[in-house]
Amino acid sequence: MSAAEKYLIGNWKSNKNSTDVAGFLKIFAHKCKNIKKIPLKIPKIVICPSYIHLPLSRDLIKKYNLPVELGAQNISPYGEGAFTGEVSASQLKEYVRYVIIGHSERRSNFAENEKILADKAKNALTNGLKVIYCVPDSKIPVPDGVAVIAYEPVFAIGTGKPDTPENANRTIGVIKKNYINTPVIYGGSVTSENIKSFMEKEYIDGVLPGKSSLDPISFYKMLINAAG
Ligand code: PEP
């Protein structure tokens, strides 16, 4: 098994209103109350709510003293200024430590190409944010300096049909040859039932669940099943 730190990164996409967010964190906090007593190696937990729920999430994570960090799902390729509708890195860093860049839904639905993604990564890195950079295969280039690479094959995202742990491990092994010392995680239909089969693979440094991260009980189960 890889010695690198393991990650559990929940991508909430365009789901939840503020009541749902508060409810999730309250239930998750209740479930996590005894976590310090559990003799397990807990992965680094990051949740990525919508922009508008970042302030609420930050306040509740603090209130409940949760072992959770915040990430954004997107970032502007530009700096601060006249870019209507965009959220800049300098604005985001008040709330988050991480940002997802290059998710396949951004690549396909919003025509984000390598140039735009590289600009986003540059802005994030210049502002001290940690980049979670998603790639659909081992051939897509990754900008220098990203904190985590997420291998997310398009066929597995939101389909209920994950890659096999063996193939994910093989592909991540190839990615790791090019990006030595960068943790590489897997995303695509990860659930509390299959998470362990990915986490225990040699090269896989964690997972990035979407749908299964929305429910606090399922997310807690993933956390416990992911713990080494
Ligand atoms: C994702 O959001 O990156 C993802 C992998 O979604 P899901 O777990 O729902 O397939």
Image (cartoon, rainbow, N blue to C red):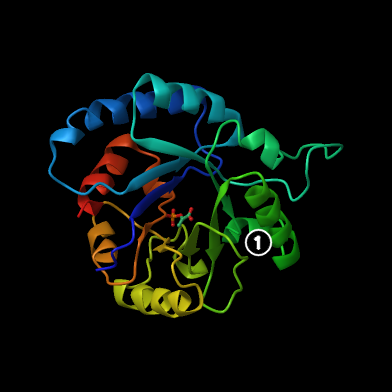
Look at 28% across and 58% down and name the residue there: 195
Asked whether 56 or 202 is in front, the reply is: 202
Which of the 4 image quadrants contains residue 95?
top right
Q: Position of residue 24 (x, y in %)?
A: 37, 29
Q: Is residue 59 left or right of residue 76?
A: left
Ligand 1 sits in quadrant = bottom left
Residue occupying the point 33% across, 56% down: 5
In the displayed structure, would residue 15 be above or below residue 148?
A: above
Estimate how packed mark 1 is, as few (under 14), some (14 to 19) or many (20 or more) residues with alpha carbons within 10 Å.
some
Front-most of 213 and 60? 60
From the image, tell me which residue sits under label 1. Answer: 107
Q: Would residue 94 be found to the left or right of residue 114 on screen?
A: left
Q: Residue furthest right?
A: 82
The percent coordinates of residue 187 (x first, y second) are: 43, 60
Say which of 214 and 67 sits in front.
67
| Placement of the C terminus among the 4 image quadrants | bottom left
Give residue 196's position: percent from left, percent from top: 23, 59
Residue with the most extreme top position: 63
From the viewer's perspective, tell me whether residue 137 is left or right of residue 79: left
- Say which residue appears at 56% left-offset and 79% top-offset: 139
Say whether residue 85 is left or right of residue 75.
right
Classify mark 1: helix, strand or loop. Answer: helix
Q: Amino acid at mark 1?
A: Arg
Q: Is residue 65 above or below residue 119?
A: above
User: Image quarter for residue 61?
Assistant: top left
Question: Which quadrant holds the N terminus?
Answer: bottom left
> Where's residue 181, x and y in %?
43, 67
Residue drawn at x 18%, y 34% is 36
